[in-house]
Image (cartoon, rainbow, N blue to C red):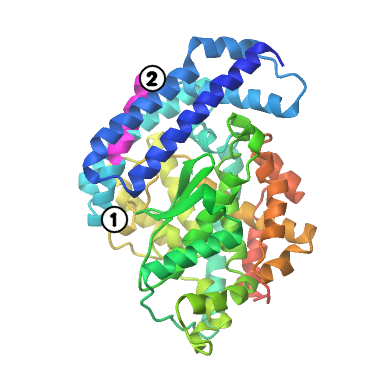
Amino acid sequence: MNKAYQSLERHFARLSSLNDAIGILCWDKEVIMPHGAAERRAENLAMLEGLRHEILTAPEMADLLATADAGDDVWRRANLAEMRRLHTHATALPGDLVEANAQATAHSEMVWREARQNSDFKTFLPYQQEVLNLTQQIAKAKGEALGLSPYDALLDSFDPGTRQTDIDPIFSRLSTELPGLIAAVLEKQNSLPAPTPLQGPFLVPQQEALGRKLMQQLGFDMTRGRLDVSLHPFCGGATHDVRLTTRYEEADFLPAMMGVLHETGHALYDMGLPADWLSQPVGQAGGMTLHESQSLTMEMQVCRSRAFVEWVTPLLRTEFHIPEGTPSWQADNLHRLVTHVAPGFIRVDADEVTYPAHILVRYELETAMINGDLALKDLPAAFNDRLHALLGLTVPDDRRGCLQDIHWPEGLFGYFPCYAMGALAAAQIRTAAFQQDSQIAPALAQGNFAPLLKWLRTNIHSRASSASMPDIIKDATGAPLAADAWQAHIRSRYLDRAPDA
């Protein structure tokens, strides 16, 4: 390790602090910022994004990276590699493009809020068009610097090293086999007694209290994080200050509860990253596929299992003051509710069987938009057509169609495929964890997440970005990432009706 490398660590520690400040400002924008502050906040964020870009692209940085020697330490070598990857991404873009994109996405996101509520794509169109134009410029510039296609360059920002050639064979198989799998699951489900709906209302303070209890049960450290409300559930914040959000409906507590469990999975990953490297690139999460695998391991794989439902049912009755013998509040009915499969319009509320279809639609459309094969004005019709083809649904309005997600308004093209890849990884991870540690399954049946969290800390969280996502998955599970474990899980839970699924 030489002085150039040591200097780089100091520079990236400064960048880490700046990233934390941006993270808190972004959380504030989504959660509590008054609407009238949007214009000024957009300027603030654009300036900070520009400052981050200046630091990362300064001539001194290029000189240091050219002469840095990390020595023989594996983590320092991986850190230097991540520094160089981030520098290449940054230097591909001029500063004025970075600031213009930050301003455009901030404006777009605020307009999207009202447009979504009013199902008003026409008003939103020029703002999204500006974001798309800038994203295409970014994709082209990064692609040229990295020697990648424009879309692969965007994908690399969210999932380093992942390419469309990795995704397309998996998604092609899902696209072919998913309709038949969904049909088989629905046929099996229709042959069984329908679950009994739970009668509300479920007061928001009760739901909030339940969410916080479950967060802590999973292992969330409430001294280093918090739970709030936002239009779109997310996990954000800063180092040692992990903030997650959900949204509530008094008629049904399950969406908010599952949203909290999902975002807690993200938060536990952030809280479990190696403390010695938190201010360095190598200490950050290893891409969004791994991040999604952690949220879906918790929400879908574990917290919709029969074992977890058996444990949580008495807690739910207590929190909502339900008499113990109430038939609809028994574990069997609750499990049928949380594993009920029904094709729906909203991605974040989708069951795990139909969820990949939502991602296939978005992946197809966003690659077409980036490549210039789909005009933005034609997006609503194209979205509706593809959702109908995969799920048989007729989308009634754009609020439940192409306006439902925040990702495109915020310029997050290349992000969506990580959701489906994360679902596949979650099934593979849960299968491996249960096989490798016989204490995990019985502990979860008692509401004890400690053995599972220990396994995740050891095999996923502690590795951060010290290796690639494919290598981390292969090392943890013994096999490359594929769809096999996910499909086996779906068949076990929904077709074979295994007792612990």
Considering every residue shown, the one lying at the far front of the view is: 223
Q: What residue would you read off at disc 1?
A: 398
Give the mark, 1 or 2, whose residue is nearer the N terminus: 2
Q: Position of residue 336 (x, y in %)?
A: 54, 77
Q: Tell me the residue at 32%/26% (across/down).
A: 100
- Local crowd at mark 2 within 10 Å, few (<14), some, or many (≥20)? some
Q: Position of residue 23 (x, y in %)?
A: 44, 38
Q: Tell me the residue at 69%/13% (across/down).
A: 2
Q: Nearer the viewer, residue 446 or 133?
A: 446
* Mark identifier at residue 278: none
* In the displayed structure image, the side of residue 434 where residue 102 appears, left or right: left
The part of the image, by quadrant, that contains residue 376 is top left
SS at mark 1?
helix
* In the displayed structure image, the side of residue 417 where residue 398 appears, left or right: left
- Local crowd at mark 1 within 10 Å, few (<14), some, or many (≥20)? many
Q: Quadrant of the N terminus?
A: top right
Which contiguous range is marked in magenta? 94-108
* In the displayed structure image, the side of residue 452 where residue 373 appears, left or right: left
Q: Quadrant of the C terminus?
A: bottom right
* Mark identifier at residue 95: 2
Q: Nearer the viewer, residue 239 or 430?
A: 239
Q: Amino acid at mark 1?
A: Asp
Instruction: Confirm whether residue 173 shows in the render.
Output: no
